Amino acid sequence: AVGARANLTRVPCNLTNIDQPPGGSLSVIDETGTRHHLDGLIAADGGDGPGKQHVTSGQRGADMGAKLAMRAQIPLHSLPAHFALPASQLWLGRGVHVVHYPIGDDLNLVATLPASRARADWQQTVMPATSPLAVLGDPAINWARTSISSAFTAPCWRRGSVVLAGDAAHSMPPHLAQGAGQGLQDAASLLAWLDGTDNIDTAFAGYARERATDVSRIVQKADISGRIMAMSGPAARLRDLALNLGGPRLMQSWLAEVWAADPRLV
């Protein structure tokens, strides 16, 4: 969509090198050795791509090896009817939290827990027979194990005519479900800036300034949310008390900035 509206060209290849000499023009080299001359490059190439490495000199968020997300999709017809309710459900436990919501005919399910508890019997310990989620402890459920990275926002989003977007610019733990959402916000902001000027450097500078400011708060909030959800012992009991006292208004206030539409991008 950005390419169609802003007269951009997508180069369908894997980049191996970015060449941008001081005062010179930008070019990239692909895996076949072909050089492509560019006016600008939007690098949405994840945490380890050449665009990210070029702009940030290799900086990235550290991997949180002590924390895992276990993901699964389960046909709703095999579960009790309440799992099909059109809402996102959050269950907080002792150092563990579970989120589930329906997508089409399936239930999307994510359990976040310390790696030390991800043993062969983790389903039975996290969702025992006495738990409202006991049905999810079925050993036949196929779970995908994913490491959770720490929150990271690139200290610099732009280097000359190369600018970062998506996970290359900001990675965040999944505790606000905003990884992909903030990437879409990046695309909308880029589109607005590129539509507003014929000067790519001006557009990239405006986009980087705008999004770096906006997304840093969301990344920080996702990180804090994860820390709150991971509490156990007395801290968890205080958390639960605060949630009970605050009620829906507390959660709505915490999420207002995340879900509010940006009038500049609508």
Image (tube, rainbow, N blue to C red):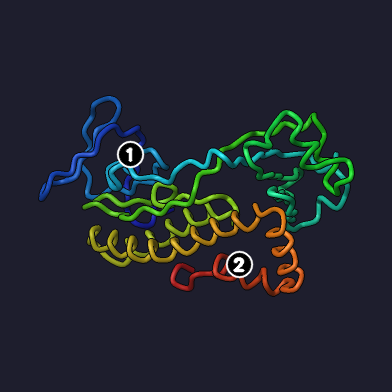
Q: Residue at x 67, y 72 (%)?
A: 250
Left or right: 239, with 61 as reference point = right
SS class, disc 1: loop
Placement of 224 over or under 263, stated as above or below: above
Marker count (numbered): 2
Residue occupied by mark 2? 255
- Location of residue 87 in the rendering, given as x and y in whole percent from the top left corner: 74, 58
**Label 2 crowd bin: few (<14), some (14–19), many (20+), radius 10 Å:** some
Give the amino acid type for the residue marked by disc 2 in the picture: Leu
Please tell me the numbered disc located at residue 11: 1
Across and down, in percent, residue 76 comes to 81, 43
Q: Is residue 177 left or right of residue 219?
A: right
Label 2: state its secondary structure. Answer: helix
Q: Is residue 246 above or below residue 75?
A: below
Q: Residues within 10 Å of mark 1 (few under 14, many from 20)?
A: few
Disc on the earlier residue, 2 or 1:
1
Q: Residue furthest front?
A: 234
Seen from the viewer's position, the closer of residues 2 and 90 is 90
Select label 2 or label 1 by which is in front: 2
> Residue 79, located in which quarter of the rendered image?
top right
